Image (cartoon, rainbow, N blue to C red):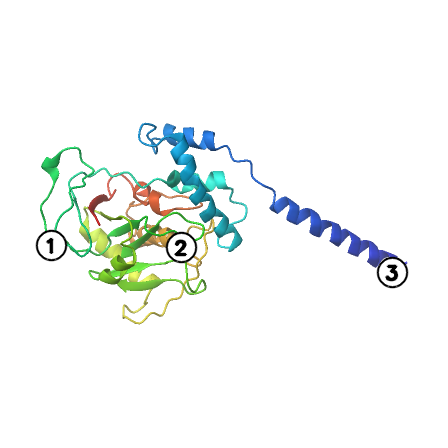
Amino acid sequence: MKKRSIILFLMLVSICSVIIPMHTRAEEQIDYNAIYNQAIKEGVINQQDLSYDDWLKENVGYKKIYDAGINENVLDPTLGYTEWIKLNHYGQPPADDNTEFTTYTLGSTKTKATMLSTSTSNIKVTQLSSFRIKPGDILITNSTSSNGIVGHSAIANGANHILDMPGYGNKSDNNRQLTVSQWLSKYNHGWIKVYRLKNSSMAAKVARYADRNYYSSNGSSKKNIHIAYKIDRHLYQKSPSYCSKLVYDAYYYGSGSASVVRAKHGYVMPYDLPGVFTAKYRPAMVHQY
């Protein structure tokens, strides 16, 4: 009798082990047309600039990033692709509401002719050496994408240092600090956009918080804070974290009682970062490399 009960129990376990994985592996039915139309409705995509067919081609790459995140266990398996691509700004770079900036080619002192403004009167003929990263600056780039996330972001935790979480490498200890030149050289294969708060004292305050809470508790050059990499829904936990969550949390907690960023839940992705700030503190893009 006891043996029969054990056999029955093992049979039930075997059945469940088949059913549960089948459920978790069920293929999501993705309505790309509905997603594209929603992006147009939200003003993220201009149909005249990006056709449905071209956007659909882009999604081949986005889907690979998403699948890699699921397979590498850095993405919550309950996060479907439809929700994920919306969180990632439909794969589109953040809008640039500041036309008075200069674009630069790294390693050159000549300004590029490419401007987001339709008027050339806003072009600032400025040498590369005259631009300096400031504490609290937010950097967003399309030159890389980690498993599970489109693009990359970082925060300047000092005048000459950038703090980020690259996603690759050691997943259990992923936060790092690089000099500005080191960071720029790693991500110079695409565009790098620099966003800056007008309130420089607030930005400096957040930069110091980021440095002391996400790299070195005593402000030294030696790292003594170790943060694991994972993209999950726990937005207000220090660890695990990911690149844009670190930036968001630094501004959320580092700004004290000031209402600098909007309270959110779930996720904050790189291309969505400029839009999470309140109107009073919304950063403007000041430079593009």
In primary-sequence order, the first of circles 1 and 3 is 3
Residue 222 figure quarter: bottom left
Q: Which residue is mark 2?
A: 242
> With 178 as the anchor, is 8 left or right in this view?
right
Along the line of sight, the residue nearer the viewer: 185 or 197:
185
Q: Which residue is mark 3?
A: 3
Question: Residue at point 38% right, 40% down?
Answer: 89
Q: Dot 2: within a 10 Å radius of its alpha carbon, few (fewer than 14), some, or many (20 or more) residues?
A: many
Q: Does 110 sit above or below residue 28? A: below
Instruction: Nearest to the eye among marks 2 and 1: give it.
Output: 1
Look at the image and tell me in which quarter the N terminus lies. Answer: bottom right
Along the line of sight, the residue nearer the viewer: 7 or 192:
192
Along the line of sight, the residue nearer the viewer: 102 or 134:
102
Please state which amino acid type lies under the numbered disc 3.
Lys
**Badge number at residue 130:** 1
Please state which amino acid type lies under the numbered disc 2.
Tyr
| Residue 27 on image: x %, y % | 58, 41
Q: Secondary structure at mark 3?
A: helix
> With 3 as the anchor, is 250 left or right in this view?
left
Mark 3–mark 2 distance (CA, rounded to whole Å): 50 Å
| Residue 263 on image: x %, y % | 37, 44
In primary-sequence order, the first of circles 2 and 1 is 1
Mark 1–mark 3 distance (CA, rounded to whole Å): 81 Å
Q: Dot 3: within a 10 Å radius of its alpha carbon, few (fewer than 14), some, or many (20 or more) residues?
A: few
Along the line of sight, the residue nearer the viewer: 274 or 258:
274
Q: Are the two marked residues, 2 and 1, in contact with CB atoms closer than 8 angstroms?
A: no
